[in-house]
Image (cartoon, rainbow, N blue to C red):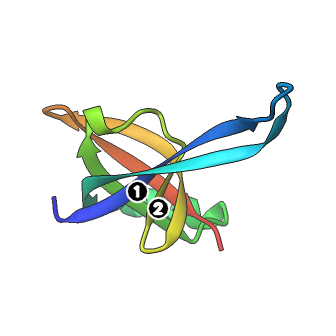
């Protein structure tokens, strides 16, 4: 694994009387391996208006149901998690300009 991505956890920020006043983002850096995207998935994404898709393989123990990851200063929404082998998973992320 030669890449590093940041998994993003978003939690509500609560004031002293229990009201939600915003959100707090926490980034967790994990080692990852960038994978290729199938041609069919690429074209389906383009038809849906998604310009960039990335897939990374990470260790399953590093992933805690985060909704976003950051790579090369871009924030990707995780739209699919797929188990592959030996406690590894693939995270598929979309980036919209």
Task: Please tell me whether mark 2 sits on a helix, a strand or a loop.
Answer: strand
Quadrant location of the C terminus?
bottom right
Identify the image quadrant of residue 86: top left
Q: Position of residue 34 (x, y in %)?
A: 27, 62
Quadrant location of the N terminus?
bottom left
Q: Position of residue 84 (x, y in %)?
A: 23, 37
Task: Please tell me whether mark 1 sits on a helix, a strand or a loop.
Answer: strand
Q: Where is residue 77 in the image (x, y as percent from the top left)?
A: 56, 53
Q: Can residue 15 be seen in this view?
A: yes
Q: Residues within 10 Å of mark 2 (few under 14, many from 20)?
A: some
Q: Residue placed farthest to the top in the image?
A: 18
Mark closest to the chain's N terminus, 2 or 1:
1
Would you place residue 26 above or below residue 11 in this image?
below
Asked if marks 2 and 1 touch (Cβ < 8 Å), the reply is: yes
Instruction: Identify the residue position indicated by label 2 in the image.
Output: 70
Q: Residue placed farthest to the front in the image?
A: 16
In depth, the one of 70 and 41 nearer the eye is: 70
Image-based side of 68 in relation to 86, left or right: right
Instruction: Identify the residue position indicated by label 1 in the image.
Output: 6
In depth, the one of 17 and 78 nearer the eye is: 17
């Amino acid at each position: 694994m030669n890449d590093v991505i940041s998994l993003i956890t978003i939690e509500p920020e609560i004031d002293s009387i229990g009201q939600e006043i915003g959100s707090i983002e926490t980034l967790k850096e994990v080692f990852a391996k960038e994978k290729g995207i199938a041609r069919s998935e690429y074209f389906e994404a383009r038809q849906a208006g998604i310009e960039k898709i990335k897939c990374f393989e990470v260790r399953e123990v590093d992933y805690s149901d985060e909704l976003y990851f950051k790579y090369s200063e871009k924030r990707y929404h995780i739209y699919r998690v797929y188990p592959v082998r030996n406690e590894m998973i693939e995270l598929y992320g979309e980036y919209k300009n």
